[in-house]
Amino acid sequence: MADSYLAGISTRRVDKLIKALGMEGISRSQVSRMAKALDEMVASFRNRPLDSGPYAYLWLDALAQRVREGGRVVKVSYVMAIAVNAEGHREVLGVDLITTEDGAGWTAFLRGLVARGLPGVSLVISDAHPGLKDAIASTLPGATFKRCRTHFARNLLSRVPKASQDLVATCVRSIFAQPDERSVYAQHSAVVEQLSSRFPEAAEMLAEAREDTLSFASFPKAHWHKIWSNNPLGRLNREVCRRTDVVGIFPNRSSVIRLVGAVLSEQHDE
């Protein structure tokens, strides 16, 4: 039953499966109790020591989920971290649940990773969540922040008329197509100047985000296409959403951690 739950099968469909096998039906509450067998595995995964470092590159992301609390449905966010370990393999480092994506929530999450032994982080890649940069500075001194290229481009294009978005997107992509760090910064300046007359708001936003968006360029070029965005988290997020979409609204916070933690543990093993 726990495996069915983890596979993204709803409790109602589990009941139908049981009956199809010639056994008596099982209630949703019974399935939920059986699914709690996952709690021990998830707790062990979330609290394991991080001893495969140094973890040079760290990706962070957050996704909203709906939970019933106090007779109403509220939104919470689960935050997760993956990193590249000393052997060059990606690991899922941790997951937690926070009420809002503010500095306090991110700081608590990152402190938990540090307490488990997170060493050697050089670059942190994420969207510009509120308070995240301050949290990184206070918990991971020496680490550089890299704003996700994909999320930034989406925000930038929202300041450009739809008819001109393809043009601006092409200009921005040219910044990342340069052969070395010096050329990346030179092209960034050229694009800002090119956009300033027709799209001043976009040009200003691009100029202000210079350091956060171009910080990847000081790292080995062979790594650029992996570290300039949160795209390595894309498949992971799709797997999580495929299971959580079945649930829709979680009955409580612990059930979110149970399902998301189990999915991430499974993906970590793969």
Image (spheres, helix red, strand yellow):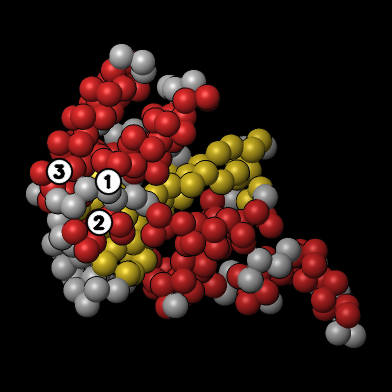
Residue type, mark 2 in image:
Trp
Q: Nearer the viewer, mark 2 or mark 3?
A: 3
> Residue 88: where, in percent of width, then height?
24, 73
**Tag 1: Cα neighbours inside 10 Å, few (<14), some, or many (≥20)?**
many
> Looking at this rendering, what residue extends furthest in the bottom direction?
22
> Residue 147: where, in percent of width, then height?
29, 41
Q: Are marks 2 and 1 in contact (CB under 8 Å)?
A: yes
Residue placed at 71% from the left, 67% from the top?
A: 9
Figure quadrant of residue 13: bottom right
Q: Which residue is mark 3?
A: 183
Q: Which residue is mark 1?
A: 176
**Tag 2: Cα neighbours inside 10 Å, few (<14), some, or many (≥20)?**
some
Name the residue nearer the viewer: 214 or 21. 214
Q: Is residue 40 visible?
A: no
Q: Are marks 2 and 3 in contact (CB under 8 Å)?
A: no
Residue placed at 34% from the left, 50% from the top?
A: 229
Q: Which residue is mark 2?
A: 224
Q: Using the image, determine if residue 21 lies above or below residue 30.
A: below
> Residue 102: where, in percent of width, then height?
35, 35
Figure quadrant of residue 70: top right
Q: What separation in Å lies between label 2 and label 3 (alpha carbons)?
A: 14 Å
Name the residue nearer the viewer: 151 or 115. 151
Name the residue nearer the viewer: 238 or 182. 182
Residue type, mark 1 in image:
Phe
| Labels 2 and 3: the sequence-earlier one | 3
Q: Is residue 124 visible?
A: yes
| Labels 2 and 1: the sequence-earlier one | 1
